[in-house]
Image (cartoon, grey):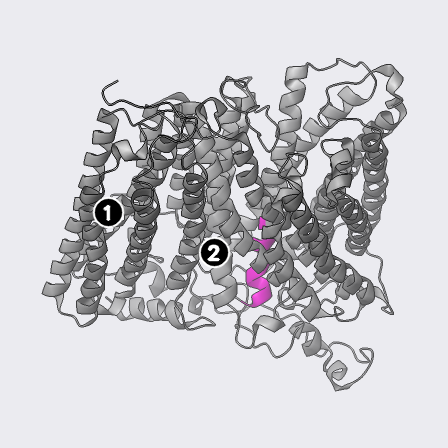
Amino acid sequence: MSSIIGPKQFQIPRIFPRPMSHSGIWYWLGTVDHKKIGTMYGIVSFFWFIMGGIEALLIRVQLSQAENDIISPELYNQLFTMHGTTMVFLVVMPLSAAFFNWLIPLQIGARDVAFPRLNALSLWVFIFGSILMNISWLTGEAPNGGWFGYPPNSTIQFNPGNGMTFWVLGLNVLGVASIAAGLNFIVTIINMRAPGMTLMRMPVFTWMTFITSILIVLALPILGVAGIQMTGDRVYGTNFFNSEAGGDPIFWQHIFWLFGHPEVYILILPAMGIVSEILPTFARKPLFGYTFIVFSGIIIGFMGWFVWSHHMFTVGLGPAANTAFTLSTMLIAIPTGVKIFNWLATLWGGSIKFTTAMLFSIGFIAMFTIGGLSGVTHAVSPSDAQQQDTYYVVAHFHYVLFGGSIFAIFGGLYFWWPKFTGYMLNERLGILNFIIMLIGFNLQFAPMHWLGLDGMPRRIYTYAENMGWELSNLAATIGGFLIAFSVLIFMVNVFISRINKKLASGDPWDARTLEWSISSPPPHYNFVEIPKVEHIDDWWYKKYPELLEGSPKQTKSPKVTVEDTSNVDESKIHLPDLSYYPLFVGVGLSIAALGVIYSYALVTIGLILVFWGCIGWSTEPVNEPHEKHH
Amino acid sequence: MSNQDVTIQHGEEIKNSTGVSNKKLLMWAFLGSDVMFFGTFIGTFMAYRNKSLNGPYPSDTLDIPITSISTFVLLMSSLGVVLALHYLKESKMVLAKLWLILVIIMGMIFMGFQVYEFSHFAHIGMTPQANLFGSTFFTLTSLHGAHVSLGIIWLIFLLYNEYKGNLTSENAIDLELAGLYWHFVDIVWIIIFALLYLITAGDGVPPGGLPWIAGQ
C-alpha cells in the first residue's frame, strides 16, 4: 500500500492512541525495532522448540519398548504430525528469522530493515499462526496426517474432523509471515547496505539470508496454493485430490515437494551462514574460499528446485524421471561438499579457540556430513526404494536438521548471546550443554540407521517383541532425554547469566564483522554513524590493519575499539515510530483462517480487522509530526 | 508538506545501495512471489485439463466472444494506468484523475463480467464442486478476480488522495507501484485467457468421461 504523507492526510479514527512509550508491554506490542522483533521471534520459537521436543519425547516413550501402548494410536499420529510441523515451521524457520532480524541490519551497517512495520507484521502473523495451528490440541483434533499431509490420508473422506484443516490453514497463515519477512530481507540486503559494502564484501551469514529469502518468497507461494487446494477439498468440496472425480493424490506430492525441497535449503542455509561466521572468528583466520562458499550457496539455492521428485522415487514415476532426479540429487551434494571442505580448510592452520560456539560449529560439520552422506545413499533411486519410509530416512533428516540446523543455531546463540543481551553465557555450562547434546543426539539418531535398514517403518505405532529392535529403540529414547537435559542446561545457563549479569563488551570474541563494532546490546539506533566499509570482514581489518600489509598474524593490539555511545546526541537520528497496525493485521488473518473452520462470522470479523489494519497502516505516517521537533 | 517531512521522505528514498527505491524493489520482489502463486494454479489447471470425469465440460460452458470483451477492457486499462501516471508526473491533474477514474471503471467492468460469468456457470451446473474443470477454473479465476478487486480498491484510495492533493508529481512513485501491480494482474490474465479459455474452449468429453446434457 502507498504511504502518502501530508498535512491533509486522511487518517482513519484511532481506537487506541499510537504507542509512544519506550518501555512496557505496549512498547513490545507496537515495536518496529528489528532487535526487539528478533528477540520476540526467538522467545516464541524457543517455546515451540520445547513443545515440539515434548512431542518427540512422548513418541520416544511410546517406542521405548515393544508392544507398548502408553499413549493411544490416535494421539501418536497427532504427535508425529505436530512434532514435524512444529520443528520445521515453528522452530527452525522462525529461529532463523530471529537471527535474520537481529543480525542483518547490524551486519550490513543499517539502522533497521527496509520496512520496519512489515517486519512487525511478519512477527505477529507468525505468532498468531502458530497459535492457530496449536489450538487444534485444545479441540482434541490435532493434525494427524503426517507433516507432508499426503492425500488420500489427509482428505475429508478418510480423515474427517478438523485436524488437517487446522494444519493446512495454519501453514497458509505462517506462509504469509514467511513471505513478508523474505521480501523485507531481500530489499534490506539489496538496498540498505552501508557505503562500500559491496555484495562480495557482505558477511556470509548475510549472503545465506539473502539466498534463503529468495527461496522463501518463491517457494512459500507454492505451499500456499497447495494449502488453498486442500482447504477447498476439505471444506468446500472441490476435487483437486479426490480420485473419485479424477483428481490425483500424486499431484499433491508434486506440489508439496516442489515447495518442500527448496524448504529444506531454507532450513539449512541460515545454519551454514552461522557457522561460516563462527569458524573464522575462533580459528583467527579468514574464511577459506569466501567466493566458493557464496557461490555454492547460490548454486544450492538454484539446484534445490530440480530435485523434488527424489521424495517420490517409489511412487512409480518411471525410470526416466527417477534417473533424472537421482542425477540432480547427487549433483546438489557437490556444492554442499565444497562448503564442508572450505570450513575444514578454514580450521586448518588456525589458532583455534574451543569456545562453546566453536564446538557447536565443529559438531555441525561432523553431524551434517554424516547426514549428507546418508542423504546421498537415498539419492540413488534403487537404494532409496529400500529406505523409503523407514527409520533410515528419519535418521537422515534428523542428522541434517538437528545435527545441522539446530547445532548451528545453538552455536549461533552462544556466539551472539553477548551481542543480543549484553551478558556473557557461562562457557563451562555451555561446553557441558554441547557434550551432552552431542552424545544424546547420536545415541538417539544413530541407531535409527540400522533400525531403518532392518526394516522398521517410519511412523509405526509399535513393534513386535521378536523383531530385535528393542535395545536400539531404548537407546534412542535415552538419547532423546539426554537432548532434553542438554536443552535444560542451556536454559539454566540463560537464567544464570540473568542473575550473574557478567557484562559483555562490544566485541567479546575479537570478531570480524560489523555487528561487533558497536556496544552490547546495541543502542536502539545501532550505529552512531553509518560505517564506511573498505574490506570484507571490515571490522577485523580496522582493528588489525597490519594484516592487510602482509603480516601473517595480528601483531599489535586492536587499533580501534568499540565506540562509547554514552553521550551521543540521539535527536539527529530518526527512527520510525511504533505502530499497532501490524498486530491488528496479524490477529485478523488468524481469526479469518479460524473462521474458515467454524463460521463465516469469524471470517468477516477477521477480514474487517485486516482491512482496517491495512488502511490504518497505509495512512499512518512513519513518524508522528510532533515527534520530529525534539 | 512541511520541509522536515520532505527531508525524511527523501532521506528514505535516496539512502540506499542501488538507487532503486525500497518500495519499488519490494513491489518487484512481491510480483516475483506472485508469479509462483499463479504459476502453480495455472500448472494445476493444465495438469488436470481433460481429466474431468463428468460434465459440464469446457465446450459446454466457455463463451469466448463475451470473455474477449472483458479481456479487451482489462488490457486497455493497462494503457489507462500508463497515461494516468504520465499526466500525474507532468502535474496535469485533470487528465491524471480522468484516466485513473477510467481505469477504475474498466476494472469494475471486468469484475462485472466475471460476476456475470460465474453466476451463469453456476446456473448451468458448473460449480467448483462439479468436477476437476470447475475446481481448477474457479480457484484460478476467482483469485485473479481478488487481485483485480484489491487493485481497484488501491486505485480508488490513490484517486481520493489525488483529490485531496496528497498525491502529486512528487510522490508519483505511489501510483507507479499500483501501476506495476495492475500491469502484472493484466499479464496474468493474458495467460489465463490463452490457456483457460482459448485453447481449452474446444475441450469436450475426455476419454472415460460421462457425457453431459444441459439441464440435467
Q: Main secondary structure of the magenta part?
A: helix
Residue lying farthest to the front in this orientation: B207
Q: Are marks 1 and 2 in contact (CB under 8 Å)?
A: no
Q: Chain of mark 2?
A: A
- Name above or below for residue A441 compared with residue A363: above
Q: Which residues are magenta?
A: A97-109
Query: Of residues B1 and A474, which is closer to you in this image?
Result: A474
Judging from the image, what secondary structure is the residue with disc 2 in?
A: helix
Q: Residue at x 79, y 71 (%)?
A: A285
Q: Which mark is residue A184?
A: 2
Q: Residue at x 73, y 62 (%)?
A: A508
Q: Quadrant of residue A467?
A: top right
Query: Of residues A457 and B156, which is closer to you in this image?
Result: A457
Q: Quadrant of residue A2?
A: bottom left
- Image quarter in which the C terminus of chain A is found: bottom left
Q: Name the residue that disc number 1 marks.
A: B153
Residue type marked 1: Ile
State yes or no: residue A560 in magenta: no
Q: Residue at x 80, y 66 (%)?
A: A346
Query: Of residues A219 and A172, which is closer to you in this image?
Result: A219
Q: In the rendered image, is residue A112 in sight?
A: no
